[in-house]
Amino acid sequence: MAVAMASASLATTLSGLNKVFEISRSSVASVAEFSSSGLKTARSCPLHGQRLSSSRTVIRQASAATTLEDGSQSEADIVPTPKVIIDQDSDPDATILKITFGDRLGALLDTMNALKNLGLNVLKANVCLDSSGKHNKFALTKVDTGRKVEEPELLEAIRLTVINNLIEYHPESSAQLAMGVAFGAVPPTQQVDVDIATRINVVDDGPDRSLLLVETADRPGLLVDLVKIITDINIAVESGEFDTEGLLAKAKFHVSYKGKAIIKPLQQVLANSLRYFLRRPSTEEASF
C-alpha cells in the first residue's frame, strides 16, 4: 500500500499542531463509553513483526532516581524510557499506535480524545503487560475515509500529540524526550550527539523493494522531513514504522524505485542525502 507523500513544509505542519497541543480534558467523557467496552487487558504482549533493534547506547538517559543509604537506587523512582511507535506494517487496514512508559500509564482517555480531534477513529484499544511494563496499543483509521493514515504530516501530528500528552500528564517524562526542551517542565539534562547517534543503512528486501533503516536524534517534524528527503530523489515509500525511544528516533521504511528494489549506487545517494540533512548544522538565516 503506497504512502501518500505530501510536500507541505515543516513550518505549516508544526503550526497546525499548535491547535492539537491546546486540547483540554473537558471532553474526555465522550470516549469513556468506548474505553469501558473496548479496552482489554492481556496478561502478556505478543510480538507483531520484527521490532527495530536497539543499537549501542549513545547517551545516558536522564532519571529522577533516588539514591538510598546503601548507595542503590529505588526502582520505583527510576523514570522509564518513554516509547511511541507508529506501525504501518502489521495491519493492512489500520495504523497501529503503541505507547509505553513503564507501568505509569492508565487508559489514556485524554490521548484517545486528542486523536479523535485529529479526525481519527480509534477502532480498537488494548493494554498488555510484560516484564518491561504496560503497553497501550491503538488501531487508528481516518474518519473521512475509514482507511489507515498515509499522510506523513498526519502521522507526525499523531506522534507529537502523544508526546505532548505524555509531557502534560507525566511531567517526569520530559527529561527523556526531545520535546521536553521546548515544552517540558524538566528539560533533558543530556543532549544527543547527532554525529554519533545518526546511523543509516539500506538493505535488500526482496526483488521489488529495499529496507531503509534510520536512527538519529529526535526532534519535532522529523518524520515529515525524512519522507520529503526520500521522495525528493524519486524514491517511493511504501510502508514503514517510526519509533520514538526517549531522545532517539528510529525509522524503518520499505522503499522502491520505479517498482523495483534500489540498486547499490542509488542506495548510496539516498544514504548520503539523509546523512547530510541529519548532520548539517542549523544556522539562522539572519545570523550574518
Image (tube, grey):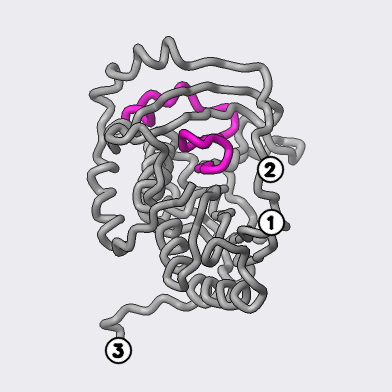
Give the residue displayed 59% in from the left and 54% down from the top. 252
Q: Residues within 10 Å of mark 2 (few under 14, many from 20)?
A: few
Q: Is residue 64 visible?
A: no
Q: Earlier in the sequence, mark 3 or mark 1?
A: 1
Give the residue displayed 50% in from the left and 27% down from the top. 105
Is 72 magenta? The answer is no
Q: Residues within 10 Å of mark 3 (few under 14, many from 20)?
A: few
Q: Looking at the picture, which amino acid does disc 1 mark? A: Gly
Q: Which residue is mark 1?
A: 206
Q: Which residue is mark 3?
A: 288
Q: Looking at the picture, which amino acid does disc 3 mark? A: Phe
Q: Earlier in the sequence, mark 3 or mark 2?
A: 2
Q: Earlier in the sequence, mark 2 or mark 1?
A: 2
Q: Secondary structure at mark 3?
A: loop
Which dot, 3 or 2, sits closer to the camera? 2
Q: What's the mark number on residue 50? A: 2
